[in-house]
C-alpha cells in the first residue's frame, strides 16, 4: 500500500513539474509526512531529493524540446543558492510543528495564487512600451559599465526568496520562479516553465548539500520510489505541455493543492496553539 501511494503521489508531483514548471514540489512534504510516515524534518530533506531529481530530468526533456534558456536559468539559480544555504541551516534548528505550520500557510498562499492566475484577464489594457525584451542585459561591462538596477534588484530579491523557501521547507519554488523569469528576466512564456526547472535543480542541490549529515535521514527507500515515479511523470508532463491546454491541468492541480493545504493546516496549526 505504501509503495502504491508513493507511485501515485510521485506521478502527480512529476506531472505538475514537467507540464507547468512548478507547483508539484508543494505536495512532496505533505505526502512524505501524512502518507508515507516521515517526520517533518525527514520530509523536508527527502523532498529536496524528489524535487531536485525530477526537475533535473524535466529540464533535460524541456531542453530537448527547445524551451530552456540555460544560461539565464543557471545565473538565476546561482544567485538563489545563498538563500538556499541560509534556509537549510535555519530549518535544522526549527521546531517540527513550526515547519508544518509554515508549510500549511505556504500551501494556502500558493493555492490562492494559482486560483487567481486562472481568473480571466483584460487583454486590451495599455501597452507597456518600457517592458524589457529578451535581449536587454541587466549588467554590461563593455564598452562601458551599465546596470539595469531595478531589474537586478528584482532578480536578487526573488532569487533569494526562492532559495530560502527551498532550503527551509524543501520546496522548489517554481510558483515564484516562473513569474520572476517572466518579469525580471523578460523571458517569453514558452521558455519560463522549462527554464524554471534549471533554477529548481540548482537550489535543491544547494539546500540538500547543506543539510547533509544534519538531523535524521529520511527513509531512502520510500524517497527513491517517490523520486522515480515523479521523474518518469515529469518527462511525460514536459511533452504534454505542448499538446494540451495547460489551463485545464492548472485548474485541476489548483483544486488538489487547496485540498491538501486545508488538510495540512487542520493537522498542523492546532499543534501551535
Image: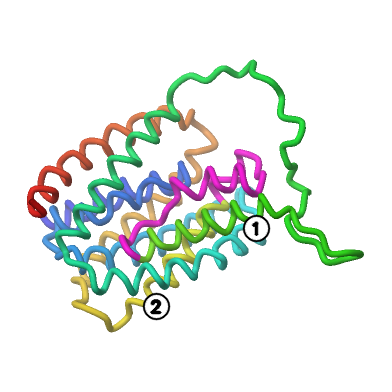
Quadrant location, the N terminus: bottom left
Left or right, 102 with respect to 33, comes to: right
Disc marking residue 180: none
Left or right, 10 with respect to 31, comes to: right
In the image, residue 140 sits, relative to residue 66, either above or below, namely below
Q: Which quarter of the picture shows residue 182?
A: top right
In the image, residue 173 sits, relative to residue 255, either above or below, namely below
Residue 255 in picture, x, y percent from top left: 28, 32
Residue 41 in picture, x, y percent from top left: 21, 68
Left or right, 222 with respect to 66, comes to: left
Residue drawn at the location 58% of the way across and 45% of the way down? 192
Q: Is residue 190 magenta?
A: yes
Disc marking residue 209: 2
The colour scheme of the drawn protein is rainbow
The residues bearing labels 2 and 1 have C-alpha atoms spaced at a distance of 23 Å
Q: Mark 1 falls on what kind of element?
A: helix
Q: Which quarter of the picture shows residue 218?
A: bottom left
The 10 Å Cα crowd at callout 1, few under 14, some 14 to 19, many 20 or more, is some
Residue drawn at the location 73% of the way across and 46% of the way down? 134
The magenta span reads: 168-194
Amino acid at each position: 500500500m505504501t509503495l502504491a501511494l508513493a507511485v501515485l503521489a510521485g506521478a502527480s508531483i512529476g506531472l505538475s513539474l514537467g507540464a507547468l514548471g512548478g507547483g508539484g514540489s508543494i505536495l512532496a512534504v505533505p505526502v512524505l509526512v501524512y502518507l508515507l510516515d516521515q517526520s517533518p524534518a525527514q520530509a523536508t530533506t527527502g523532498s529536496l531529493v524528489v524535487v531536485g531529481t525530477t526537475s533535473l530530468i524535466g529540464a533535460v526533456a524541456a531542453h530537448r524540446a527547445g524551451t530552456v534558456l540555460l544560461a539565464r536559468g543557471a545565473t538565476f539559480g546561482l544567485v538563489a543558492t545563498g538563500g538556499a544555504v541560509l534556509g537549510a541551516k535555519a530549518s535544522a534548528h526549527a521546531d517540527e510543528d513550526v515547519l508544518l505550520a509554515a508549510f500549511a500557510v505556504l500551501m494556502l498562499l500558493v493555492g490562492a495564487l494559482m486560483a487567481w492566475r486562472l481568473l480571466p484577464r483584460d487583454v486590451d489594457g495599455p501597452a507597456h512600451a518600457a517592458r524589457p525584451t529578451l535581449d536587454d542585459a541587466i549588467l554590461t561591462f563593455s564598452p562601458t559599465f551599465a546596470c539595469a538596477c531595478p531589474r537586478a534588484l528584482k532578480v536578487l530579491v526573488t532569487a533569494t526568496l526562492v532559495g530560502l523557501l527551498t532550503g527551509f521547507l524543501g520546496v522548489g519554488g517554481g510558483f515564484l520562479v516562473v513569474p520572476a523569469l517572466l518579469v525580471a528576466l523578460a523571458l517569453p512564456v514558452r521558455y519560463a516553465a522549462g527554464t524554471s526547472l534549471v533554477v529548481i535543480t540548482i537550489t535543491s542541490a544547494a539546500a540538500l548539500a547543506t543539510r547533509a549529515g544534519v538531523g535524521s535521514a529520511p527513509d531512502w527507500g520510500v524517497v527513491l520510489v517517490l523520486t522515480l515515479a515523479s521523474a518518469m511523470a515529469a518527462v511525460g508532463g514536459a511533452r504534454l505541455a505542448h499538446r494540451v491546454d495547460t489551463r485545464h491541468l492548472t485548474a485541476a492541480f489548483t483544486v488538489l493543492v487547496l485540498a491538501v493545504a486545508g488538510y495540512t493546516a487542520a493537522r498542523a496549526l492546532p499543534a501551535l496553539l
